[in-house]
Image: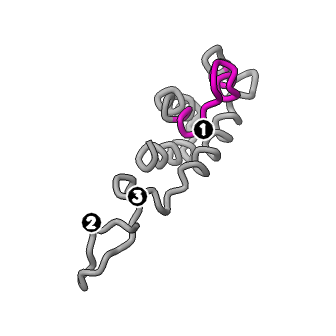
C-alpha cells in the first residue's frame, strides 16, 4: 500500500517508501546482504580483524545460537559497523548503512 501521507497538487497520492506505513519498495534484505559483503571485505582480512569481529563472524554463522538474519545482525551492531567503515573512510558503506538504519531498523 503506498504511503497516503503526501499529496500532489491534484490531491492524488504519491508513492513513497515509508517504513511506518509499509515496507513496499524497500529492499531491506537485499541491502543487508550487500552491507554484510562490505563488512566481510574488511573483517575477513587477518590484518583488519579483532576479537569482536571474530565473534561477529561466528554469530553470523549461528555459532553462538540460532543463526540471525543479516538485518538483525546489522541492527544489533550498528555502532560497531559504523566505526569499522569510518576507520577506513568507506563512504559508500556508510551511506548504505544509513539507508538501512533509516528504512529498515
Q: Is residue 58 magenta?
A: yes
Q: Which residue is mark 1?
A: 70
**Mark 1 neighbour density, 10 Å: few (under 14) some (14–19) many (20 or more):** some
- Closer to the chain start, of discs 3 and 2, is 2
- Residue 83 percent coordinates (x, y): 51, 28
Discs 3, 2 touching: Cβ within 8 Å: no
Q: Which residue is mark 2?
A: 5
Give the CA distance from mark 1 to mark 2.
30 Å
- Residue 93 percent coordinates (x, y): 57, 43
Q: How many marks?
A: 3
Highlighted range, magenta: 54-74
- Closer to the chain start, of discs 3 and 1, is 3
- Residue 7 percent coordinates (x, y): 26, 75
Q: At 54% from the left edge and 44% from the top edge, which residue is drawn?
A: 91
- Closer to the chain start, of discs 1 and 2, is 2
Looking at the image, which is closer to me, 55 or 62? 62
Mark 3 residue element: loop
**Vertically, is 69 above or below 58?**
below
**Vertically, is 4 above or below 63?**
below
- Residue 95 is left or right of residue 59, and the answer is left
Q: At 50% from the left edge and 57% from the top edge, which residue is drawn?
A: 26
**Mark 2 neighbour density, 10 Å: few (under 14) some (14–19) many (20 or more):** few
Name the image quarter holding the N terminus: bottom left
Discs 3, 1 touching: Cβ within 8 Å: no
- Residue 42 percent coordinates (x, y): 68, 32
Give residue 38's quadrant in the image.
top right
Q: Which residue is mark 3?
A: 22
Q: At 43% from the left edge and 50% from the top edge, which residue is drawn?
A: 103
Give residue 71's quadrant in the image.
top right
Q: At 55% from the left edge and 55% from the top edge, which residue is drawn?
A: 27
Amino acid at each position: 500500500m503506498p504511503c497516503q501521507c503526501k499529496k500532489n497538487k491534484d490531491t492524488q497520492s504519491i508513492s513513497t517508501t515509508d517504513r511506518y506505513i509499509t515496507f513496499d519498495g524497500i529492499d531491506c534484505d537485499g541491502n543487508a546482504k550487500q552491507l554484510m559483503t562490505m563488512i566481510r571485505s574488511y573483517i575477513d582480512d587477518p590484518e583488519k580483524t579483532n576479537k569482536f569481529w571474530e565473534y561477529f563472524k561466528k554469530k553470523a554463522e549461528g555459532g553462538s545460537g540460532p543463526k540471525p538474519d543479516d538485518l538483525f545482525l546489522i541492527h544489533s551492531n550498528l555502532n560497531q559497523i559504523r566505526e569499522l567503515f569510518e576507520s577506513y573512510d568507506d563512504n559508500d558503506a556508510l551511506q548504505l548503512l544509513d539507508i538501512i538504519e533509516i528504512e529498515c531498523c
